[in-house]
Amino acid sequence: MKDHKDHEDREDHKDHKDREDRADHAAGATRPGRGKATSRGVAAWASGVAILLVAMPQVARGRLPDRLATHWGADATPDGSLPLWAAASLPAVAWALLVSAVALAARRGAGVRGWAGATLLSAGVGLIGAQAVIVRANLDRSDWHQARSETVWFVVVIAGAVTAALVGVLLDRRTAASAPPGAVTSGGPALEIPEGERFVWLSRVTNPWFQLSAAAGGLVAVAGALAGAAGLVGNPWPLIAPFAFVSVAMTAFSSVRAQVTERGLEVGFGPLGWPTRRWAVGDIESARVERRTPAQVGGWGYRLSGLGTTVMLRAGDCLVVRARGKDFAVSVDDAGRAAALLNSSRVRS
């Protein structure tokens, strides 16, 4: 009896370990790319904020007094000031210290990663907004005591910082939602899914050049908005509008996440996973793996060609589904597993 019990325990442990290994393998398709993309995004944001904090007072120094009013009393009169060099450098130093502290805390404990993005987004927006308001208040003043109070603009900055924090929380929730909630089946091109067993397959791909373009366009648009808020330019919209459009478009197609469940296929775009396209398993006629290149489909991004619709973020294997007589392809890793799961689900349904 004891030998029989030990044998059952070993079998249960082995089965549990096999399930863990399969889940780790499936989830691993999303982790490395997501980690690198996050690191690049944080580095670009940290660098961009620091540059803007230092550059804004320096660009306008010919129209600023030697000392800048940095604080106003209850009666809206300036009661604190800093030399121009300090007004330009101290916020950047404070920002660098904050980024370092958040990065160190995030590395030491996964529990803080949820608020790290929200903290950096909110603090960055708040700092560059406050710097723009200070420059605007001191612009064309011969002495810092003449600086006008900009209460309305400070309220706008606070609202922007709160909004940025909410966006950071939303991004974190979207990332957390990509963790597989149930069992993940494994196998080759033909997968047998036990009756009643649920599964989920996930894969995420990012294009660093799209991310870089989005960041560059966003920084130019933000710089234009700050220049307008600070009074450095009369009409900043010819600078803001095109670069903001480029930034939003590039962000939307800088990454793609594909998810396969027993219900079908879901493909989400951008860091928020929106917009999203869905195919019910009953609508999918077939699923396969096909090697495609940008040259074959007409370029990068969301492409329409004789091959159908292709989301091309990297050359190589693509998951191709045929539904309602049309092909849709997305360049993701581990496409063979996704195709096999979809075909098995289609047959079982």
Image: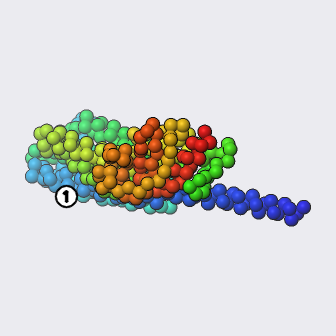
For image coordinates 43% across by 39% down, the residue present is: 325
Rendered location of residue 249, percent (x, y): 30, 44
What residue is at 67 percent from the left and 47 percent from the top? 194
Q: Amino acid at mark 1?
A: Trp
The one of 313 and 114 positioned closer to us in this rendering: 313
Residue 71 visible in the displayed image: no
The quarter of the picture where the N terminus appears is bottom right
Colour mode of the rendering:
rainbow
The x and y percentages for residue 208 are: 34, 57
Crowdedness near tag 1: few (<14), some (14–19) or many (≥20) residues, C-alpha within 10 Å: some
Across and down, in percent, residue 210 comes to 31, 53
In the shown orientation, is residue 125 left or right of residue 229?
right
The residue closer to the viewer here, 152 or 31, is: 31
**Which residue is situated farthest in the right direction here?**
1
Q: Is residue 306 left or right of residue 217?
A: right
Left or right of 224 in this view: 258? right
* Labels in figure, total: 1
SS for dot 1: helix
Residue linked to disc 1: 85
**Residue at the spot 61% in from the left edge and 60% down from the top edge:** 21
- Outermost residue toward the bottom in this view: 3
**Residue 219: horizontal and vertical position, in percent?**
25, 50
The residue at the point 59 percent across, 47 percent down is 344
Q: Is residue 72 visible?
A: yes
In the picture, the quarter occupied by the C terminus is: top right
Q: Quadrant of residue 132?
A: top left
Instruction: Tell me which corner region of the image, top left, top right, bottom left or bottom right, holds residue 317.
Output: bottom left
